[in-house]
Amino acid sequence: MRSRYSAFVLGKVDYLLQTSAPENHAPNERELLKQSCANTHWLALKVIEAKENTVEFSAFYEVKDEVEQLHERSSFELRGDQWIYVSGVFLPPLTFGRNDPCWCSSGKKYKKCHSG
Ligand SMILES: [Zn+2]
């Protein structure tokens, strides 16, 4: 999962295609992934819970100077020797208290960092 996040950050579309279920690909999946990578400025990944074949995470990204959050539980399947992303369920965004550590791992409190 972390490797897929890195691939999104770095725009490694081939890797993203190889590690997601082909039966779920849109006909123009490569183009969609390219656009997604080009248009999204990823800020941070927080893995909340990783089990054998599901990972719950929040990924933070910036759109027009606003921070957005993708909170998802992803399901993976082992096919051959490769874990393949098969589906994801969107969850409500995590919320942060003013005194919580900021999600960006700056070490600062949320209120002094990305609280807006
Ligand atoms: Zn921060």
Image (cartoon, rainbow, N blue to C red):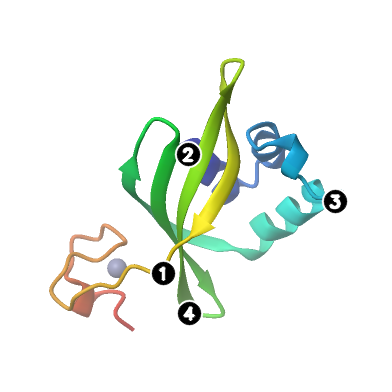
Earlier sequence position, callout 3 versus callout 1: 3
Q: Pointers 4 and 3 in contact (CB under 8 A)? A: no
Inter-mark Cα distance, 3 to 2: 23 Å
Inter-mark Cα distance, 3 to 1: 28 Å
Taking the view exactly as shown, the residue that stands out farthest to the top is 80
Q: Name the residue under label 3.
A: 28
> In this view of the protein, which residue sits in the foreground, 97 or 13?
97
Could you say whether the residue bearing mark 1 is in a helix, strand or loop? loop
Q: Name the residue under label 4.
A: 66
Say which of marks 2 and 1 sits in front.
1
Which residue is pictured at 73% across the width and 44% down the height? 24
Earlier sequence position, callout 2 versus callout 1: 2
Q: Quadrant of ligand 1?
A: bottom left
Left or right side of 90 for 99: left
Q: Mark 1 points at which residue?
A: 92
* Residue 3 percent location from the top left of the image: 50, 36
Inter-mark Cα distance, 1 to 4: 17 Å
Q: Does the residue labelled 2 lie within 8 Å of ligand 1?
A: no
Inter-mark Cα distance, 2 to 1: 20 Å
Could you say whether the residue bearing mark 3 is in a helix, strand or loop? loop
> In this view of the protein, which residue sits in the foreground, 81 or 45?
81
Amino acid at circle 1: Pro
Earlier sequence position, callout 4 versus callout 3: 3
Amino acid at circle 4: Glu
As drawn, 3 above or below 108: above
